[in-house]
Every structure is written in structure tokens, then in C-alpha cells.
Image: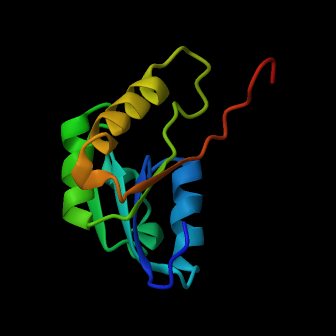
Amino acid sequence: MTTSSPLSILVIGASGRTGLEILRQLSQDTRTKEVHAFCRDPAKIPDQHKALCQSIVKGDARSSDDIERAIDDSNAQVVIVSVGNGDSVAKSDVRTASARALARIMEKPQYHHVHALVVSSTGAGTS
């Protein structure tokens, strides 16, 4: 993606460790116009990170409706997904379900201009 104008970016999973670091990094990037946070519990975002966000949206990453509302409200050109289940090693469907929810949205013609980036701190294979 090549752009000369600053971007509006939505971070899904913004209250986790990876999401918080993404918020911090984006706030220092001159290509970023606005950063919008999306998470289940906005109270989990520390005040210093809240100050970096244009908006904070409460929602479920498994819900296409919630994600679509957040994209529309933020006018996001880029969606960064950083969902996970913290330190838990228990099985979780959040990555698969959130990917499917976002894919359903991005199939719609009005969202073809939106770019998605998935960031994970989860290892692969036996790691």
C-alpha cells in the first residue's frame, strides 16, 4: 500500500500487550493520522495509551457487526488485528473467529479499499 496522506488505523485487540505496543508505535509514526482502539473491555487500556487514541470502541472481535461498526465509525483505511488469549495456553477460537468476521466484512465492495494486517505474538509449530 502506497499512500502520501496520513492514515486512519483501527487496532482490534488493543487492550492486550501486543495491541498496546501497536498503539504506542502508531502514535509515533508520521504516516498515522488517527488511531482507533477496539477491544472487549476499554477499561483495560491504561490511561497513557487511551490518550493516544482518537476513539476507543467496545466490541467483540468475533462479531462482524461490531467490527463493521468500528470500521465505519473510524473511517479506517487499515485494520490491524492483534487478538489472542494472553498468557493462557488453553484452546481459543478468537483468532479464527475474528479472521472470519473481518473477512466477511472485507468481501463487501464498500470495504475493498480497507487493508488488513494481522500481528501475532503466538508461536508456530512446537514453539
Q: What residue is at 44 percent from the left and 51 percent from the top?
A: 15
Residue extending farthest to the top is 91
Q: How many discs appear?
A: 0
Residue extending farthest to the right is 126
104 lies left or right of 95: left
Q: Is residue 58 visible?
A: no
Q: What residue is at 37 percent from the left and 36 percent from the top?
A: 103
How far from the left and from the top, in percent, is residue 2?
Answer: 55, 73
Query: Is 26 rendered above or below residue 124?
Result: below
Camera-side residue of 54 and 99: 99
Query: Is 78 rendered above or below residue 8?
Result: above
Quadrant location, the C terminus = top right
Q: Is residue 104 visible?
A: yes
Q: How is the image coloured?
A: rainbow
How far from the left and from the top, in percent, is residue 88?
Answer: 58, 24
27 lies left or right of 11: right
How far from the left and from the top, in percent, is residue 74?
Answer: 26, 65
53 lies left or right of 60: right
Q: What residue is at 48 percent from the left and 19 percent from the top?
A: 92
Quadrant location, the N terminus = bottom right
Query: Is 114 rendered above or below residue 33?
Result: above
State the image quarter where residue 24 is shown. Answer: bottom right
How far from the left and from the top, in percent, is residue 35?
Answer: 40, 70
Query: Is 62 rendered above or below residue 1?
Result: above
